[in-house]
Image (cartoon, rainbow, N blue to C red):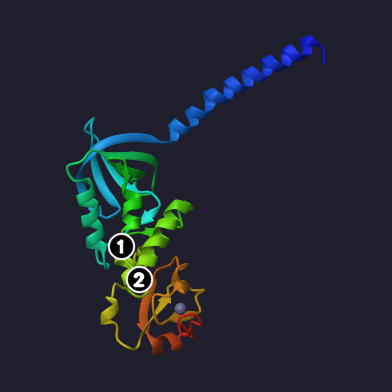
């Protein structure tokens, strides 16, 4: 390599570095937006509305977690927790994307403390593994489980994403002995005695039917929940 060649090589490298420095911040900032606002409405623990400093409403859905629904155990407790965490405070939301309902998927902090993480640490939310692979969130859920607090204080709590898919909203404790769970999908061949993990992949909605009817339509007993 002669001097001229090295000079051209260094010049090219400098241009490349310049390009990288210019492009990286652009891609990051075009995906996330940080807003500050006040809590003005709340649906449940993970869904609420902020009024920003420039008087815009933002529907927020917390990123990476799923809180129990209104009708579920600890649904109200999770909602109350979020309310107390945010009320009368400056709420900072890092907006990551929008979901199919137009809500802003966000990481939320108050006084530098993460609400997403606090709900998990309190045993008031599940790590939403379908949408998040965050190991920190996974660890917080595990710690809450090991302490058996709130959601994890009851035997086999029903994840909210299963609860939302239930075809018939029958309270679990009002079930008659003859009722079993099935997935409404045609391909589904089994019936279950509880909200078993075998139903977690059911996309068509979960229904409760009488066990005699289940057998009549050729459904077989689920090997997992009937042996556990
Ligand atoms: Zn089962």
The mark total stands at: 2
Residue identifier under label 2 = 157
The answer to whether residue 142 shows anywhere in this view is yes
- Element on which disc 2 rests: loop
Instruction: Give the Cα separation between the discs numbered 1 and 2.
Output: 10 Å
Asked if ligand 1 lies within 8 A of label 1, the reply is no
Q: Relative to 59, does residue 216 appear above or below in the rendering?
A: below
Rendered image quadrant of residue 34: top left
Query: Against 1, is 120 above or below?
Result: below
In the picture, which quadrant includes the N terminus?
top right
The answer to the question of whether label 1 and label 2 lie on touching residues, with beta carbons closer than 8 A, is yes
Residue at the far top: name it.
Answer: 4
Q: Tag 1, which secondary structure?
A: loop
Q: Residue 196 versus residue 220: which sits nearer the camera?
A: 196
The spot of residue 35 in percent (x, y) is 30, 35
User: Residue at (26%, 58%) from the top-left corner?
Assistant: 78
Q: Determine which quarter of the picture holds residue 32.
A: top left
Position of residue 106 measured from the top left corner of the image (x, y, whole percent) = 36, 44
Residue at image point 29% right, 72% down: 169
Q: Is residue 64 above or below residue 71?
A: above
Front in this rendered view, residue 3 or 72: 3
In the rendered structure, the answer to whether residue 208 lies left or right of residue 222 reads left
Q: Is mark 2 within 8 Å of ligand 1?
A: no
Q: Which mark is residue 68?
A: 1
Expressed as whole percent of the image width and height from the top left, the position of residue 196 reads 43, 75
């Amino acid at each position: 390599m002669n001097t001229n060649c090295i000079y051209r090589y260094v010049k090219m490298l400098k241009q490349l570095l310049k390009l990288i420095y210019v492009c990286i911040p652009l891609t990051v900032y075009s995906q996330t937006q940080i807003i500050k606002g006040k809590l003005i409405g709340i649906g449940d623990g993970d869904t609420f509305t902020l009024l920003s400093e420039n008087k815009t409403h933002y529907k927020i859905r917390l990123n990476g977690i799923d809180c129990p629904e209104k009708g579920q155990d600890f649904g109200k407790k999770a909602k109350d927790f979020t309310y107390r965490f945010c009320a009368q405070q400056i709420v900072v939301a890092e907006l990551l994307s929008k979901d199919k309902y137009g809500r802003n998927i966000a990481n939320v902090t108050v006084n530098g403390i993460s609400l997403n993480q606090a709900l998990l640490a309190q045993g008031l939310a599940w790590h939403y593994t379908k949408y998040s692979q965050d190991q920190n969130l996974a660890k917080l859920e595990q710690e809450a489980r090991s302490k058996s607090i709130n959601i994890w204080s009851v035997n086999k709590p029903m994840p909210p994403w299963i609860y939302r898919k239930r075809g018939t909203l029958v309270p679990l404790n009002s079930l008659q002995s003859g009722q079993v769970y099935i997935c409404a999908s045609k391909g589904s061949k089994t019936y279950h005695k509880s909200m078993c993990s075998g139903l977690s992949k059911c996309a068509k909605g979960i229904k409760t039917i009488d066990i005699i009817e289940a057998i009549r339509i050729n459904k077989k007993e689920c090997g997992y929940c009937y042996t556990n």
